[in-house]
Image: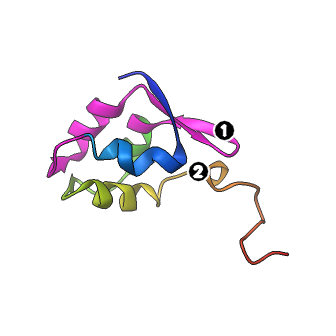
Amino acid sequence: MTDEINLSRLEPTLEAHAYPADREALVDAFSGTTVLFADGDADLGDLLADVDQETFASAADAYAALQNVLPIEALGEPGQSDGDA
């Protein structure tokens, strides 16, 4: 799979895979898929490889685990938050 997706489409993209799934199956399935961030990008297969969890019960489970390995560039400008005015 060679695609580019926006970060906002990450969970729906993960839903294209059958679950439960192990990490290696997801890495293989999504290698070559580029996730576009606010400031940069990363390969989805590489991101999944960085996750400590071995198996995922659902796309939501995989998405939650990915939240811990997303780079700071995925979140927008450093030092900014929704509470800043």
Earlier residue among tags 2 and 1: 1
Residue 56, image x, y percentages: 22, 56
Q: Amino acid at mark 1?
A: Gly
Quarter containing the N terminus: top left
In the depicted structure, whether residue 30 falls above or below residue 56: above
Q: Quadrant of residue 75?
A: bottom right
Q: Which residues are magenta?
A: 17-45
Q: Marks 2 and 1: CB-CB under 8 Å?
A: yes
Q: Which residue carries the number 2 mark?
A: 71
Residue 27, image x, y percentages: 31, 36
Tell which of 54 and 73 is nearer to you: 73
Q: Residues within 10 Å of mark 2 (few under 14, many from 20)?
A: some
Task: Name the residue: 45% across, 25% down.
Answer: 3
Q: Residues within 10 Å of mark 1 (few under 14, many from 20)?
A: few
Residue 16, image x, y percentages: 27, 40
In the depicted structure, whether residue 71 falls above or below residue 43: below
Task: Name the residue: 37% across, 29% down.
Answer: 31
